[in-house]
Image (tube, grey):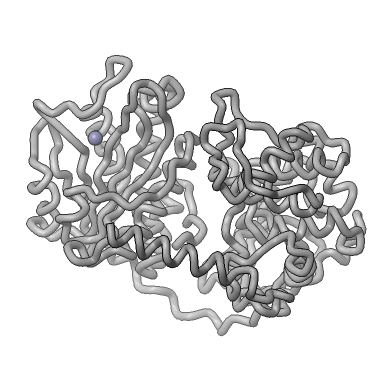
Amino acid sequence: MEKWIILLCIAVVSSMLAPMVQVDASGNFQDIGDSHRAAKEITYLTNKNIINGVSSTHFVPDREVTRGEAAAMIGRSLGLNGTKRNTSFKDVSAGNMASGYIMELVAKDVINGYGDGTFRPDVKLKRGEMAVLINRAYNLGGTNSSSAAKVLMDKGIAQGMSDGSFGTNITIIRSDFAVFLARTINADFRVQTGDTSIFKTTQYVNVGSSTLNMRSKPQIVNSPSNVISKLNHGQVVSVASYTGNWAYIKVNNLTGYVDKSYLSSSKPSAVLPAPPPAAGSDITVIIDPGHGDHDPGANGFGFQEKNVNLNIATHMKSYFDQTSIQTKMTRTGDAFLSLTERAQFAKKYNGDIFVSMHMNSFNHSANGQESYYYSTSATNPYVNQSKALSTYMLSRMQEAWPLVNRGVKKGNLAVLRENTVPATLVEMGFIDSEIDLKYFKSDTERKKMGRALFLATLDYYYHYEGRTDLAQYYSQVGASPSKRLH
Ligand SMILES: [Zn+2]
């Protein structure tokens, strides 16, 4: 009860403050310096009140844009009436910040909801969807994601990508959205198409003793089939633009894409001595297939959750078995353990992190994936670690099975709360969902999920714990580190 009162107070205070804070330039955003690649566009849109910071001091340029936020920004750019109102969508209340803009854009046929009566305002927007939205909002002519993307490229709104490499299915981040929107409404921001001077930002390759793959497309397809060059530490490249996590670059006379996390704006120091060979054996991952024995968990389509969990856990373990990272499973057969026994398992067996695996169910009427962490440090102190672990888990699960993303969530679950190490609980899909069924029913797909949970564990150690010595284990399975997410 008290908690709600405090939250309400914060909400009231911040909404009272918001109109009084004069954000008149991106220079006021501590995370957008003058040299930020989108600084001019963000300043332009901020001054027009089309786009806001996440707070008065931070723009958070790398945050993904949701459908609701996109509707609000496009609606403001068109000067539509954003007064909040009742909507025709069951998941957009009148109180939703974008409710007015959503209804205005629906009336103009710029944006639609889904067949089930939802709008899904919190779903992240993909670049292809953005292209269609901008085309419809500004009558540019494109009607589907590829024709809309082509229009944007032809007009110099989105430059530098050949038709197949627009990144249609990559989610769009706030800074990219700002750039595209500014170029749409003000031609002065557009780039001259076919102009090689678009490669104007100097960056340096920063890969230490490794090499950086330069690819023909901003995606890892059948690695290494689209690798066109390997760049060395310290090499100078010229960047034109970014697609998600990819930078479109030119080096010598070659153009292509590299993972932008391996570029730095200042010259990196000379190659560091090679890191020591992967130790790895100092890590023990506790794998917890949920349920067992007389507790089958959820069921659907003849599948029992306990069996699906165990099968995927076994696949996950088989990937670790190719590395020096140790694993310990809470159960390897159809056995029952109490939640407390599971939570204490890591302590008992000197585990370092804990991954509990589950399948969800809800009357055949929900689907998708989510991950959970416990957010109160009083019992399990590893809140930040658990959150990061859960974030990497969900991201890789989405890669493996592209189901609905239900988010990384706080959960007061015994196996997390009573744990003594960073802990996550993943709901890999809904066992009673016909949509999710096509994935979990297939052993190939279950193996893919086991691989995803393995990679997410590596991502956590690689990015959060700085264990770059584990990099070799990605290449062993034809993968590379995820983008940094926490
Ligand atoms: Zn379960």
Task: Inspect this view and state whether residue 341 appears.
Answer: yes
Residue 339: which quarter of the image? top left
Instruction: Please identify the quadrant where the C terminus is shown.
Output: bottom left
Residue 247: which quarter of the image? bottom right
Quadrant hosting ligand 1: top left
User: Residue at 75% of width from left, 48% of height from top?
Assistant: 81
Instruction: Please identify the quadrant where the N terminus is shown.
Output: bottom left
Residue 423 in the image, given as x and y percentages of width and height: 25, 55
Residue 174 in the image, given as x and y percentages of width and height: 65, 58
Numbered label tally? 0
98 lies left or right of 360: right
Q: Nearer the viewer, residue 391 or 265?
A: 391
Task: Inspect this view and state whether residue 250 appears.
Answer: no
Residue 132 in the image, given as x and y percentages of width and height: 76, 39
Farthest residue, direction bottom: 269
User: Residue at 61% of width from left, 46% of height from top?
Assistant: 68
Q: Nearer the viewer, residue 197 or 49?
A: 49
Q: Is residue 300 above or below residue 452?
A: above
Q: Is residue 164 above or below residue 476?
A: above
368 lies left or right of 432: right
Q: Nearer the viewer, residue 449 or 485?
A: 485
319 lies left or right of 46: left
User: Residue at 8% of width from left, 34% of height from top?
Assistant: 336
User: Residue at 57% of width from left, 32% of height from top?
Assistant: 89
Residue 190 in the image, given as x and y percentages of width and height: 87, 59
